[in-house]
Image (cartoon, helix red, strand yellow):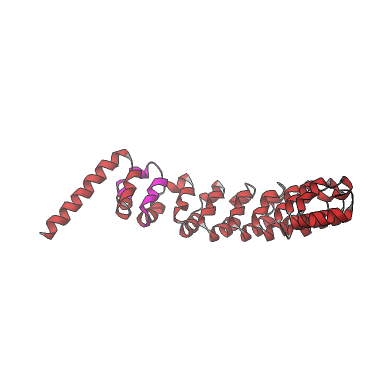
Amino acid sequence: MDWNNKEDVLKEVKGNGCALEFASDTLKDDFDVVMTAVKNDWRAFRWASEKLKDNKDLVMEGITSNTSILSFASFRLQNDFEVVMEAVKNKGTALELASTKLKDNKKIVMEAVKEDGFSLLYASDILKNNKEIVTEAIKQSGYFFKFAGEKAKNDIELATLAIKNYNSAIEYISPQLKDNKEFIMPYIKSLGNNLAYISKRLRDDPEIVLEAVKSNGYALAFASDRLKDNVTDIIRCKKLIRVFAKK
């Protein structure tokens, strides 16, 4: 095997892209050789020359096979709007590989989140609080509310949508909403175990705790120590009342 011979290397990387590691520096700088290797295995791009890692045509074509190629591209291309847009259209989470500047670009982030709500994790702090972007993510699953910014987590509309699409999203809402009795009550009634995620003050609220226990008896474990015994007594009394009522 002659690693300086283009024909030999082309044949080798066509079947095993990562064999590019052993090619001569000259062939690691050859567009045809590197493209052939990358088409077989995107990881081969790590052995391309610095010049080709900065080749926009090669990276754009490689992205169509696997967006992870962007991880080995030059910083210039990770900061290129067209390149990153193409990447996130193919796979939203490719946003992770974009430059800090483009993670703060609303068009890029919106496209990424549309493709995969999980991409919200990689958006800038500013865009994690953008209502349009957060809405797009949590429409897919309220679980993605976990990655929203603090301001967004305190938005009643967003919190309501998130919980609607994922009951346990109540875990991710702001401390202020976790302490808002009026907001919390419906979600305690529908899923008692949500008691685990609300404020300490409300876990010591008899009305809240009773509704939680009505929904799920095991929710009592999340009540304040003060109320655990009280609620147990109340439940016993209610059982006695039902027994005597039947008589």
Query: Quick check: 20 above or below 200?
Result: below
- For the C terminus, the image quarter is bottom left
Place of residue 90 in the rendered image (x, y in percent of width and height, measured from the top left): 68, 60
Give left or right: position of 200 versus 69: left
- Report whether residue 35 is seen: no
> Seen from this angle, which residue lies furthest left?
247
Number of marks in the rendered image: 0
Residue drawn 54% across and 46% down?
150
Place of residue 104 in the rendered image (x, y in percent of width and height, measured from the top left): 68, 50
| Residue 116 lies in quadrant | bottom right
Q: Main secondary structure of the magenta part?
A: helix
Residue drawn 49% across and 54% down?
159
Residue drawn 34% across and 48% down?
219
Q: Nearer the viewer, residue 71 or 186?
A: 71
- Report whether residue 7 is seen: yes
Give left or right: position of 240 versus 111: left
Magenta span of residues = 190-209
Place of residue 147 in the rendered image (x, y in percent of width and height, measured from the top left): 56, 49
The stretch drawn in magenta includes residue 91: no
Place of residue 232 in the rendered image (x, y in percent of width and height, measured from the top left): 24, 45
Give left or right: position of 212 versus 60: left
Give left or right: position of 68 versus 120: right
Q: Nearer the viewer, residue 120 or 133?
A: 120
> Seen from this angle, which residue lies furthest top?
225
The stretch drawn in magenta includes residue 203: yes
